[in-house]
Image: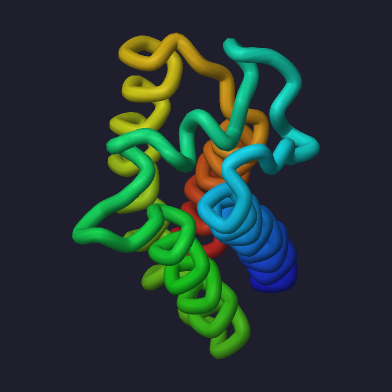
Amino acid sequence: MEWVLMVLALLGLLLSCYALYVEWKFHQKKKYHALCDISSAVSCTKAFSSPYGRLFKLPNAFYGVLFYVSVFLFAFYGLPTFVFYGAVLSMLATFVLAYLSYVKMKNLCLVCSSIYVVNILLLIFSYRAAF
């Protein structure tokens, strides 16, 4: 079961790295158009560059990278209980960020939504592995 957690962690890591890349390119060139920017209502750049896209002056994706590396290491070393508790905390962040994106900003961020799905799956599979 730990291999599923490691695969999910790698997927979350890739999505978080892409989010960092999009934000970096956006700040480098204001006219950058990311692949995930489909319209004004479906835009990851809009989410990443919003005031909600940062915490303590660092992009949310940076914290995602740290989280998914930690999840990978915990799963690799056979510690699914730690993955589960981290997944519970990530779900709190998922609920807050999804609310801000979907309700407050009225924006669908495809990368963010994919990360939310990864977090839900991490919660489910880490629970199954830990208990």
The residue that appears at 53% across and 76% down in the rendered structure is 69
Q: Quadrant of the N terminus?
A: bottom right
Q: Is residue 121 visible?
A: no
- In this view, the residue in front, 88 or 33, is 33
Above or below 20: residue 29: above
Whole-percent x, y for residue 30 in the image: 58, 42
Q: Position of residue 31 (x, y in %)?
A: 66, 38
Measuring 44% from the left and 15% from the top, which residue is drawn there?
Answer: 102
Residue 113 spot, x, y in % from top left: 59, 32
Q: Residue furthest left?
A: 56
Q: Position of residue 96 (x, y in %)?
A: 29, 31
Colour basis: rainbow
Nearer-the-camera pick, 87 or 64: 64
Q: Nearer the viewer, residue 102 or 86?
A: 102
Looking at the picture, does residue 93 appear above or below residue 128? above
Q: Residue at x 48, y 57 (%)?
A: 61
Please state if 83 lies on the left or on the right of 73 as rendered.
left
**Residue extending farthest right:** 35
Quadrant holding the C terminus: bottom left
Find residue 110 and report its image quarter.
Answer: top right
Residue at the (38%, 72%) spot, across then down: 82
Total labels: the figure holds 0
Q: 131 or 70, which lies in front?
A: 70
Asked if residue 97 is positioned above or below residue 24 in the image, the reply reads: above
Is residue 131 at all visible to an observer of this figure?
Answer: yes
